[in-house]
Amino acid sequence: MRLTKPSFRVVALSTVVTGLVACAAVQMTPTWEAWSSSINPATSYETLQEVIYDPAGAVISAGHASLIGSGQDTLVVMKHTTNGAPIWRTVVDLGAGTYNRPWASTLGTDGSIYLVTETTLIKFTSNGTESWRRNISTLINGDAALRDVEISGNRLYVAGRDLYVFDLNGALTNTVAQIAPLWDVAITTNGIYAAGTGQVHRYTTNLVPVWNYALPVVQNPPADMAITNDGTVYVATFNSTPQDSAYLTRINSNGTQVWSKFFADPDANSYQLSGIPNVELLPDGNVVFGVSQQPTRIINIINASNGTVKTSNKQTTGLIDEMVVDSKSGIYVVGNNKPQKFDNTATLLANGTMPSGADISSGGLAVTADSIYVGAGLFKNNDMKMYVSRYANQ
């Protein structure tokens, strides 16, 4: 019998800087690096989880600082120029007793930043001023378990214990009760989709239910979706039996399963932290499915028509904390201290270097045609600090 592995909230560290994984891969070094500490680094543990590229010409990152031994979390949001110069930094005290890391963020058309922690939805102006905050846990008198936020028109859709809808002034306009907690919400021209705990829901733009799909397997809450223009849904779900496995399921626009594929534990010999499965669409019509179990990450290229694995690449470089696909079929992943780039056959193209060991549960990522922006928590002088850097996108 295998030992029980840590939950998603366990923090593990890697202080070893790994070398090249594949000789053919390009070695990327940062063109600039920025370090930050919001409070006394000797008494806090600080990491970054979110990175957003602002088309106006800036990079926004968000993380949290935890006072060692107190359980008190401080949210930190920063803006840098695309050359790495600091523009502003905002620090928000979130209080004690909650795991209030930033789980997701999105950018408004006016440059405003909307961010969710475990408990709270917060809006910042493009200048870093806090406009308002809504503690949803207080609102519902329970754990809101917030995990995602998306903006569409003048509405914010927040995935958590239920699906919450706010206007841009912070007023709660609707709550859609869920069978189980959500981890992902997506807005398309076909409607609104939400997923979590083996469940996928589709609503009209007015939040009228269209269909509900339930995967007939016991599931843990994590989930990630990719949705095509015709309403086809690919949903990645974490599986608890057996431990650390996953399913990738294709659902048609009517809510009917087309196929569902099981993926075993990425590293049966590891008892460390598991990553949340990631799914993204590739421009060539295939699907990329990323799974990880510290220190192993696997990039799978999936045939969309039948769910078979076309190619796969296994790396021993750390969790996948975030995965992005660009318009040229580049696949980018971050986690631990090894950002990587793959092509649409899962061939490793580039490894990024970082100057020190990283918090393996941190990692933010934003990609443009010429830049890769990465955020993490890294050791500096034996203290864990917030770190953001830029690599040239080769």
Image (cartoon, rainbow, N blue to C red):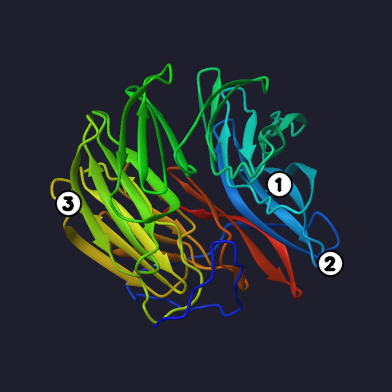
Figure disc tally: 3
| N-term-proximal mark, 1 vs 2 | 2
Q: CA distance from mark 2 to mark 3?
A: 49 Å
Q: Which residue corresponds to mark 1?
A: 85
Residue picked out by circle 3: 303
**Residue 62, position in %: x, y?**
66, 47
Residue 144 appears in which quarter of the rendering? Answer: top right
Residue type at mark 1: give it. Ala
- Within 10 Å of disc 3 (Cα), the crowding (few <14, some 14-19, many 20+) is some
For the point 56% across and 60% down, which residue is it? 30
Kind of residue at disc 2: Thr
Q: Specify few, some or many for label 1: CA neighbours under 10 Å numbering under 14, 14-19, or 20 or more.
A: some
Report, in whole angstroms, how far the alpha carbon at label 1 lies from the one at label 2. Answer: 26 Å
Of labels 1 and 3, the one closer to you: 3
SS type, badge 2: helix
Asked if marks 1 and 2 touch (Cβ < 8 Å), the reply is: no
Dividing the picture into quadrants, the one containing residue 227 is: top left
Whether residue 342 is visible, yes or no, is no
Q: Tell me whether circle 1 and circle 3 mark residues in contact (CB < 8 Å).
A: no
For image coordinates 50% across by 18% down, the residue present is 153
Asked if 51 appears above or below 239 in the picture, the reply is above
In screen coordinates, is 322 left or right of 90?
Answer: left
